[in-house]
Amino acid sequence: MHTWPFPNIPPELFDTLTDDEWRTLEALTQTYLEHVAHRQQRLPATND
């Protein structure tokens, strides 16, 4: 099992992000997760 979840993005790339880029990335990630959670609440349950 990989310890780094992004096989196409090296972890060193994250070390080069500015504080503003970090805040933007965090905000975009939070927005995405909220959208997914909202969609899951609207979709009917499945028996997968």
Image (cartoon, grey):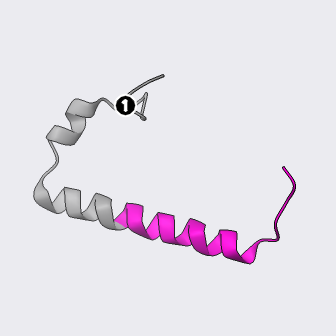
Q: Residue furthest top?
A: 1
Alpha-carbon neighbours of circle 1 within 10 Å: few (<14), some, or many (≥20)? Answer: few
Looking at the image, residue 46 lies above or below residue 14: below
Stretch in magenta: 28-48
Residue 14, percent from left and from top: 22, 41
Q: Residue furthest right?
A: 47
Mark 1 = which residue? 4
Quarter where residue 20 is shown: bottom left
Position of 28 with respect to 1 (left or right) is left
Decide whether residue 34 is among the magenta residues.
yes
Quarter where residue 44 is shown: bottom right
Give amino acid for label 1: Trp
Looking at the image, residue 9 lies above or below residue 29: above
Residue 31, percent from left and from top: 44, 70
Quarter where residue 23 is shown: bottom left
Q: Residue furthest front?
A: 47
Decide whether residue 17 is among the magenta residues.
no
Residue 45, percent from left and from top: 82, 66
The rendered magenta stretch, by its main secondary structure, is classed as helix
Position of 33 with respect to 11 (left or right) is right
Q: How many marks?
A: 1
Looking at the image, residue 48 lies above or below residue 33: above
Q: Residue at x 21, y 31 (%)?
A: 12
Give whichever of 7, 38 is nearer the camera: 38
Tell me the element at label 1.
Answer: loop
Q: Residue at x 15, y 39 (%)?
A: 15
Give whichever of 24, 41 is nearer the camera: 41
Position of 35 with respect to 5 (left or right) is right
